[in-house]
Image: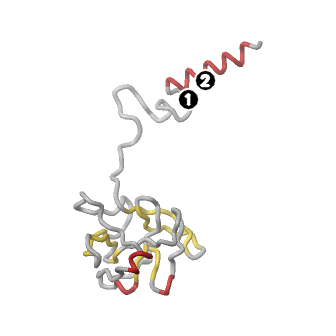
Amino acid sequence: MRQLPLLAIAVLALLTACGGAPGGPVAAGWMPGRAAGPPPERAGPIRAATVTVGGRSQTVLVDSRGMTLYYFIPDRGGRATCAGGCARSWPPLMLPSGTETPFAPDGLSGSVGTVASPDGGTQLTFDGWPLYRFAGDTAPGMAAGQGQGGKWFAVTAEIPQS
């Protein structure tokens, strides 16, 4: 009887090593000669995520680290105006080096583009609005910049026309 627990542990270890345990390659649909898992998604500098904004759960744009993205009302018309000290508190979302054509993540309506940043480089835009992060957001999922000064707002489906 004492050997039964030892046998169970050995079988579990064997299944795990061979991919037969839950979550292993067999459970994920792995078969010889076939790639494991779904095809990789295109990675991009922005994506959509659910964040609590103003006490309400909303879908917003976030950067590749999950930090909420914002637009700045004085940027209406598509010209980036936050520079110098402003950009230290509100870092612009810059086009990653080596990236030529920005794109919106699958399932996200709206267009991603670029504009010249006043401090140099190429800043990403969404529906014509230059995009920024907020230095006060210290972790993914935060939206502490929402409504700051009546001019900063998280990029949601209700983004106004630039």
Whole-percent x, y for residue 54 in the image: 57, 76
| Residue 160 found in image quarter | bottom left
Measuring 48% from the left and 67% from the top, which residue is drawn there? 59
The circle drawn on residue 105 is none
Specify whether 56 is left or right of 135.
Answer: right
Q: Residues within 10 Å of mark 1 (few under 14, many from 20)?
A: some
Specify whether 98 is left or right of 10.
Answer: left
Q: Which residue is mark 2?
A: 12
Name the residue type under label 2.
Leu
Whole-percent x, y for residue 42 in the image: 33, 52
Whole-percent x, y for residue 159 in the image: 41, 78
Query: Which label's residue is closer to the chain start, 2 or 1?
Result: 2
Q: How are the colours assigned in the image?
A: secondary structure
**Residue nearer the viewer, 53 or 132:** 132
Pointer 2 with pointer 1, Cβ within 8 A:
yes
Name the residue type under label 1.
Ala
Per the image, label 1 sits on a secondary structure element best described as loop
Specify whether 19 is left or right of 72.
Answer: right
Say which quadrant the C terminus sits in: bottom left
**Residue nearer the viewer, 79 or 61:** 79
Q: Quick one: which residue is furthest to the right in this view?
A: 1
Q: Calculate the distance from the C-alpha at mark 2 to the C-alpha at mark 1.
A: 8 Å
Q: Which residue is mark 1?
A: 21
Q: Quick one: which residue is furthest to the left in this view?
A: 100
Per the image, label 2 sits on a secondary structure element best described as helix
| Residue 155 found in image quarter | bottom left
| Residue 32 found in image quarter | top left
Measuring 46% from the left and 74% from the top, which residue is drawn there? 154
